[in-house]
Image: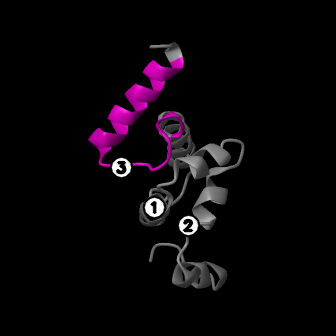
Amino acid sequence: MGTHDAINAANAEAARKAGWPELTGTAKQIGWAHTVRKDKMDEFEATPMPEAEKTRWREILLRELRAGAWIDSLSSPWQALAIINLTTEEHADLLAGQFAGS
């Protein structure tokens, strides 16, 4: 097992322990995506915002189950991945300025 494989496996185990949903895709994609998802979630968690708002964004981010989407977001901010996972209602709330803390 290479260094990257060990890191990916450790991140996959941490995700399972945290109760994060399983990712879908090829085995290679899933392995890598666990690490990308962990890095994006760390980036997100470091973002200052009220806890109610943070809880809502966390739930939205963790809706993304496609390993490929996490990998594709590698060079994008966490917000880019979150926006594509908004429901129609959440999108409307965000545009109306009624999203925070709901």
Dot 3 amino acid type: Trp
Question: Which region of the structure is painted magenta?
Answer: 4-29
- Dot 1 alpha-carbon crowd within 10 angstroms: few under 14, some 14 to 19, many 20 or more: some
Q: Are marks 2 and 1 in contact (CB under 8 Å)?
A: yes
* Residue 72 against residue 93 in the figure, above or below: above
Residue located 45% across and 56% down the image: 62
Dot 3 or dot 1: first in sequence order is 3
Residue that carries the numbered disc 3 in the rendered image = 20
Q: Relative to residue 75, is residue 47 drawn left or right?
A: left
Residue located 44% across and 77% down the image: 102
Q: Are marks 3 and 1 in contact (CB under 8 Å)?
A: no
Residue located 66% across and 81% down the image: 95
Residue that carries the numbered disc 2 in the rendered image = 85
Residues at marks 3 and 1, CA–CA distance in whole angstroms? 9 Å
Dot 2 or dot 3: first in sequence order is 3
Magenta-colored segment: predominant secondary structure = helix
Dot 1 amino acid type: Arg
Task: Give the label on residue 63, or none.
Answer: 1
Which SS class for mark 2?
loop
Count of number-bearing discs: 3
What percent of the width, then of the height, locates residue 58? 46, 58
Q: Quadrant of residue 84?
A: bottom right
Which SS class for mark 3?
loop
Q: Relative to residue 12, is residue 64 drawn left or right?
A: right
What percent of the width, then of the height, locates residue 40? 56, 44
- Dot 3 alpha-carbon crowd within 10 angstroms: few under 14, some 14 to 19, many 20 or more: some
What percent of the width, then of the height, locates residue 33? 52, 40
Dot 2 amino acid type: Asn
Q: Is residue 28 magenta?
A: yes
